[in-house]
Image (cartoon, rainbow, N blue to C red):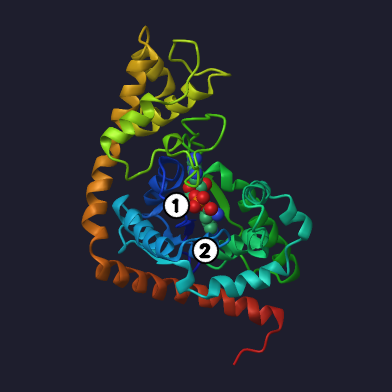
Amino acid sequence: MINNEKICFSGVQPSGNLTIGNYLGAIQNFSRYSEDYKCFYCVVDNHAITVRQVPAELRRRTYETLALYMACGLDPEKNTLYVQSHVPAHTDLAWILNCFTGFGELSRMTQFKDKSARHADNINAGLFTYPALMAADILLYQTDVVPVGIDQKQHLELARDIATRFNQLYPDTFTIPTPMLAKSGAKINSLADPTKKMSKSDENTNAVVYILDDRDTIIRKFKRAVTDSDTCVRFAEGKDGINNLMTIYSCFTGKTIEEIEREFEGQGYGTFKLAVGEACADALAPVQQRYNEIISDKAFLEAQMKKGADEASYYARKTLSKVKRKLGFVQI
Ligand code: TYM
């Protein structure tokens, strides 16, 4: 909370093409907070370089992620939209929080374990201390709520622990943030292996539906989605593929699981998969149309980046200077 304003913060890495997991688990929910909260939505490029990026692709995806924020309904007049590296207070506070984060705590992070297994040739210090930077992102704005998917919950818990620890040593420094998970859609799974999270870094592009996939591609990917040998569209244990498709359909249509079971009673998986593909394509069409209008206007995007960075810096500097004062740093 800053000056009685409630604060919402979240971020997305420009590390790959954004998926319907990012959309349903996070970005779609961001605009829900715009009316009642002061919202900061960040393109977290510093996080992205914890794994190797091709510079031209990182640059392109940074613009794309900002454009997608807007295409998904985030009005830059109502939300502060910006790029992390444009506000150096993030990395400044991250260093400080690193000194209040335990080696053991960071070692327990499942995302670190997964990513270091996948990038065994580049297990760098940034990958390890990533959650301290994430805590800095959040705590810098005295954030009350953080809309995220389930995979980020462990990082959020660590951010809360770091804030609590810091506050015990230096009272009233940080607001303790609360993670806000989407009611359904907080974990969208891969279409090829529905026991695994759908991920923008998956090499199998058929396992992932991207927000910018065209209609035919979306429908084709859903048709090929892995299901089971049963034929009945119902939500049940052991039916991971169907459960995942029902969740996706429910998110895009607003129908409940019971309504979906009734709608497809007596019909095969083929009909259901086609309906999921069509619902997804229909819902994404207006987002794609807005995106295409925005992405070609680089000057507009850069002006928004600049405006967002100025706004964010104003808030970030307040917390950073408070933290430095409490720590005993001389400020000139
Ligand atoms: P990232 O870029 O991996 O994902 C962005 C958001 O999308 C959610 N998400 C999903 N939700 C449901 N199903 C999925 N399959 C799925 N895949 C991704 C993520 O949970 C996330 O909310 N570390 C973060 C970025 C970050 C951040 C922050 C988030 C940096 N600082 C501060 C919140 C607050 C990340 O890698 O997200």
Q: Which residue is mark 1?
A: 16
Residue type for callout 2? Met
In the figure, residue 306 lies in which quadrant? bottom left
Q: Is residue 239 above or below residue 90?
A: above
Please provide percent x and percent y for residue 101: 73, 63
Say which residue appears at 54% left-offset and 63% top-offset: 49
Q: Are marks 1 and 2 in contact (CB under 8 Å)?
A: no
Q: Is residue 54 above or below residue 218?
A: below
For label 1, count other residues whose C-alpha is less than 10 Å away and answer few (under 14), some (14-19) or many (20+).
some
* Quarter occupied by the C terminus: bottom right
**Distance of label 1 from label 2 (alpha carbons):** 32 Å
Hey, which residue is sitting farthest top in the picture? Answer: 266
Q: Which residue is mark 2?
A: 1
Q: Is residue 159 above or below residue 323?
A: above
Disc nearest the viewer among 1 and 2: 1
Say which residue appears at 40% left-offset and 44% top-offset: 23
Hey, which residue is sitting farthest right in the picture? Answer: 104
Question: Mark 1 vs mark 2: which is more N-terminal?
Answer: 2
Hey, which residue is sitting farthest bottom in the picture? Answer: 332
Is residue 138 or residue 221 the one in the foreground?
221
Say which residue appears at 45% left-offset and 57% top-offset: 14
